[in-house]
Amino acid sequence: MKRLFHISKVFKPLAILPALLSAACAAISPLPVPVERPVGRDQVVYKTVNGIELTMHLFIPPAADDQLLPAIIFFHGGGWTGGDPSYFFPHGRYLAHRGMAAFSAEYRIKSRHGTLPLKAMADAFSAMRWLRANARRYGVDPDRIVAAGGSAGGHLAASLAMLEGFDEPSDDLGISPRPQALILLNPAVYVDYGDGPEGFEGRAKEASPILHIRPGLPPTLVMHGTKDETVPYPLSRLFCTLMRRAGNECRLVTFEGRGHGFFNYEKGNLPDFRRSLAIIDRFLVEIGYLEERAPRRSRRGR
């Protein structure tokens, strides 16, 4: 697809981006495992490849009056090397309570499967196609699906909306992998430094969402901490600047003084977890995927 503008002309600092990021982005480190690891409400195998079964964890609220529900699919972080779907179980449980179907996908990673990032990308495309193909089985509206993720998982979510040519060959390519909205948490939207973290097999430019911004992309929420030493905060700022200049909706919420993975449900991190979840909730209300919360009655007013 032909881009309508050359990205370096829109934002001149991008021309020196590889040099600036080579030190700051040497690798995307695996995030710590959450202290609490709640079990998903249900789980199914969504893909089997080379004898590896990949699991989808489901949080499905009861549908009201046979009404199809909006859905969100999460991709965990971990530098395409580690991580676990349980990172987003707390988010999935919360959103299911709010009336949204939530899914957290397992994908191939180096520590468990000996694979490089392109396999993770293929799995993300498979996961979205599986969800859309099975949407009505789970009471999901196939035309209201959000892709979300943190760090490397943010890269996977953004890739679904912006990139082509990373499909699993056995997938039904007639099923669209495109989400209707994106939620990206300190996302790795640029991987073209050297050979990319752990090697993108010579395809780092193709695999960098920030280099493939164009008009017509879905509404996007980005959250990032200013003290992130793993994925630099200016990268998300630049990403949203370029998204808006291309005519897309992109909201950047800054977490001052916060490092990588500030949104995780962890001991000592609950204020940031709650704040990030509230911001996600508000974004989903504004795009019409969640209902407005009923106002709390004050004790004084009772």
Image (tube, grey):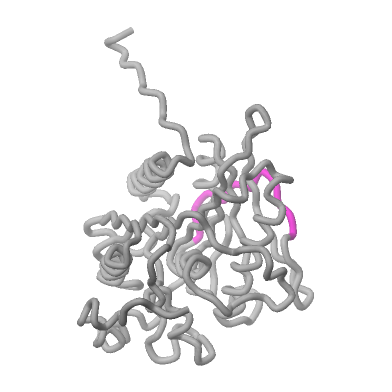
**In which quadrant is the C terminus drawn?**
top left
Image quadrant where residue 49 sits:
bottom right
Across and down, in percent, residue 87 comes to 52, 56
Query: x%, y% of residue 263?
Result: 39, 54
Q: Please tell me whether the stretch drawn in magenta is mainly helix, strand or loop.
A: loop
Q: Residue at x 24, y 77 (%)?
A: 10
User: Is residue 127 found inside the magenta-colored segment of the image?
Assistant: no
From the viewer's perspective, is residue 213 above or below residue 14? above
Q: Is residue 55 left or right of residue 298?
A: right
- Residue range of the region highlighted in magenta in the rendering: 33-45
Is residue 187 visible in the rendered image? The answer is: yes
Looking at the image, the residue that sits furthest to the right is: 51
Of 254 and 125, nearer the camera is: 125
Give whichever of 261, 254 is nearer the camera.
254
In this rendering, the count of numbered labels is 0
In this rendering, the answer to whether 3 lies above or below 193 is above
Identify the residue at horizontal 27%, vertical 11% (top origin).
Answer: 300
Does the rendering let one see residue 111?
no
Q: Most extreme residue toward the top, as rendered?
A: 302
**Residue pictured at 50% horizontal, 55% vertical:** 180
Q: Quadrant of residue 282?
A: top left
Give x and y (percent) for residue 241. Answer: 26, 66
